[in-house]
Amino acid sequence: MKTLVVYYTRTGNTKFAAETIAAELEAEIDEVIDLKKRQGRLAYLPAGRDALRGKETEIAQTSRNAIDYDLIIIGQPVWAGSPTPAIRTYVNKNDLSGKKVALFFSDSNLGKAIEKTKALMPNSTFVGELALPAKAFENKEEAKRKIAEWCDILKTV
Ligand SMILES: Cc1cc2nc3c(=O)[nH]c(=O)nc-3n(C[C@H](O)[C@H](O)[C@H](O)COP(=O)(O)O)c2cc1C
């Protein structure tokens, strides 16, 4: 099964998880880059507001084409209980109909992020979801163990 890990990160947690997943599954990996400035204290509130309002954003051209893969694993932080504008934009631009999709999040309070993200891909088959509390990344070995367990399940889908 050809597998692609697609992720957005602002501060690196999701990147760590994405790279661990890609290594476990020998998958290819693609970062979604939000061209809107999201770093710094002043960008925090607009970022949460954009996510909550379901706004899209400008993203950089990604390097892989999701159409070429059987399983797409999508990762992002939770923002205001919602998917990030970058991932919202990515899934709106890339038709994942008929694809197997697994979702992972870094968060401490998921809110409705899973349901809201799934609603963006009504014709995909969801085969897994993983929520990693931001705190989990403080112990990288423990985080890797949890991620590896999840990957073992994904190997069977
Ligand atoms: C704008 C903004 C809104 C956030 N809202 C939530 C939230 O609703 N629930 C939550 O658990 N974490 C929330 N967080 C925290 C991030 O999801 C968490 O720190 C995550 O691990 C960051 O991942 P990253 O390092 O890949 O960017 C928010 C962070 C930002 C920047």
Image: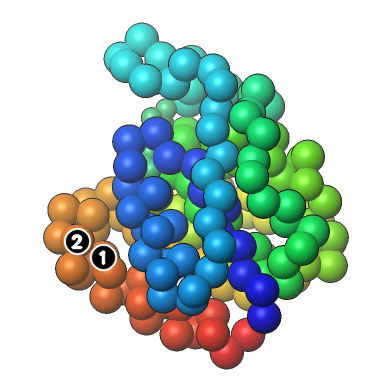
Specify the color scheme.
rainbow
- Binning the other alpha carbons within 10 Å of mark 1 as few (below 14), some (14 to 19) or many (20 upward) gives some
Amino acid at circle 1: Ala
- Binning the other alpha carbons within 10 Å of mark 2 as few (below 14), some (14 to 19) or many (20 upward) gives few
Q: In which quarter of the image is residue 1?
A: bottom right
User: Which residue is pictured at 48% across the width and 76% down the height?
Assistant: 25
User: Which residue is pictured at 56% across the width and 21% down the height?
Assistant: 35
Q: Residue furthest front?
A: 63
> In the image, is residue 77 above or below residue 133?
above
Label 2–label 1 contact, CB within 8 A: yes
Q: Can residue 27 be seen in this view?
A: yes
Amino acid at circle 2: Lys
Q: In which quarter of the image is residue 53?
A: top right
Q: Can residue 120 be seen in this view?
A: no
Q: In which quarter of the image is residue 21?
A: bottom left
Q: 105 or 12: nearer the eye?
A: 12
**x and y percentages locating residue 116 in the rendered image:** 64, 47
Q: Which residue lies furthest to the top in this view?
A: 42
Which image quarter holds the C terminus?
bottom right
* Secondary structure under the numbered disc 2 in the rendered image: helix
Q: Disc 2 to disc 1, how far (Cα)?
A: 5 Å
Q: Name the residue under label 2.
A: 140
Q: Which quadrant of the figure shows ligand 1?
A: top left
**x and y percentages locating residue 75 in the rendered image:** 51, 53
* Secondary structure under the numbered disc 1 in the rendered image: helix
> In the image, is residue 94 above or below residue 71?
above
**x and y percentages locating residue 153 in the rendered image:** 49, 84
User: Which residue is pictured at 31% across the width and 73% down the height?
Assistant: 146
The label on residue 143 is: 1
User: Which residue is pictured at 33% across the width and 36% down the height?
Assistant: 11
